[in-house]
Each structure stands twice: as structure tokens, then as C-alpha cells.
Amino acid sequence: MVRRLAIFAVVAIAGLVAACADDDADVPIGRPPATLAELTGAWQAAPLRLDPLMWGTIENACRRDIEFPAGAHALHVDVRGGGVAIVRMTGAQSGTCYALQITATGQVNGAGPGARSEAAEHWVIPAGTTLGPVEQQTVEGGDLKVTGRSVQGPVGAGIQTVIVQPLGQPQIAATVMNGWFSAWWPVALPQNQQGAPLAPGPVRIQGFDANGQLVNEIRG
């Protein structure tokens, strides 16, 4: 399968506050770091946590795969089994590795498409209960053992939990980290007569505050 690399210009996102993401990974807490067996095992509706070593391995793999400069670093990583990692990069350049492969030996390889900016990004966390705009992508390519779809986008400091509800699929708890959310789910990718994936179905995305109150809802 031919991999795709999109190059895009960085645009300003309205409603941002001057709170820059640190170089240190702000990883989800509340459970121990995932084992390699969990990262490469069955898909899970809740995100897994990474230890610093695997975080760095995934970050470096994304940097190599999309040819990010040394000044770019991982803002956000979503892992939930299936041998898949989704990475949002920021810094000297910004962009996303939409699907990296985590192997049974602990290596991380390029797999799916990705996107990279032409300019530096000084990422700031959106204010309040901002949610979106949402980007949808496919999870496929390389030696991945699964196919699927993903959603991701900015999330405000006032939202602690994001729940993704794809049509006909179970609810998914997104990874929420450093003003960004993302999630993916395994699904077959039907194609048109030209071999391109058909447009994704509707996705409901809900944001909840620290008290569990619904504060924003959008359709992706």
C-alpha cells in the first residue's frame, strides 16, 4: 500500500491561551504503564499509559517516519492495543503520524500516512470547553494487523474526559493530553471502485468536565 504524506500550513486556532505544552510527556495517570503485550494485544476502548522509554521510542519513530526535525517533539500519543500508536508532534514543525506499528519485539515502525507542517508551532492549550475542530483519518498501512478509523483535535483546559461514539461501534474513551484528544477503533475500510476508502460515518464526540458534567458535544 502506498503511504501518503501531506504537507500543510499551520493555522491559528481561535480561543487559545498562553499555556505551552512542556517537553515532558503529560501521560494519563491512574494505571501502571502498559506492557508490550498490552500494546500489541487486543484493542481496548480505554487508552493505555506509556512508560518514558516507550514514549521516546514512539516519538523517535514518528520523527523518522515523517522526517520531523530534531526540534519537534511528541505533544500527544494515543495507544490502546492493536500494535497501533497515533502521535501528534509540535515544536520546530507540527503534524501527525496517523498510524505507527508497535511490534511484538518492541520496535516501532512507520505504517500509515502522516502530515507535517512547513512552519514551527508554539502550541497553546485551548481555553474553556473548546472541542475540535475534528480531523478524521484511517488507520491502515505497512505491516499493521488491523484497519480502523481515528478522530483527533484540540480540547480545552476545562474538559477532562472525551467520549467518542462512532455509529454502530462501542463508546471509546479518548486520550486527553496537553490540549489534544485522539482515539481510534478497529473497523473494516470499505473501498470505492478506485480502491480508495469510502467516507467515514458520523461520530458523536462529548466533552465532560472534572465533575463529570457534559460541557460540549460535537459531531465529527
Image: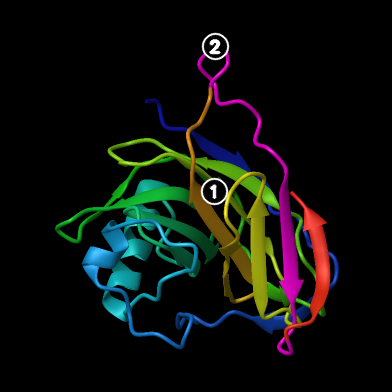
To which residue does mark 1 refer?
116
Q: Position of residue 94 (x, y in %)?
A: 56, 58
Is disc 2 surrounded by few (<14), some (14 to 19) or many (20+) residues within 10 Å? few
Could you tell me if residue 96 is visible in this image?
no
Q: Main secondary structure of the magenta part?
A: loop
Q: Nearer the viewer, residue 65 or 151?
A: 151
Q: Position of residue 214 (x, y in %)?
A: 80, 75
Name the amino acid, label 2: Gln
Q: Is residue 139 left or right of residue 207?
A: left
Q: Nearer the viewer, residue 162 or 128?
A: 162
Mark carried by residue 151: none
The residues tagged by marks 2 and 1 sit, at their Cα atoms, a distance apart of: 26 Å
Q: Position of residue 59 (x, y in %)?
A: 37, 64
Name the amino acid, label 1: Arg
Magenta region: 191-211
Identity of the residue drawn at 27% across and 57% down:
40
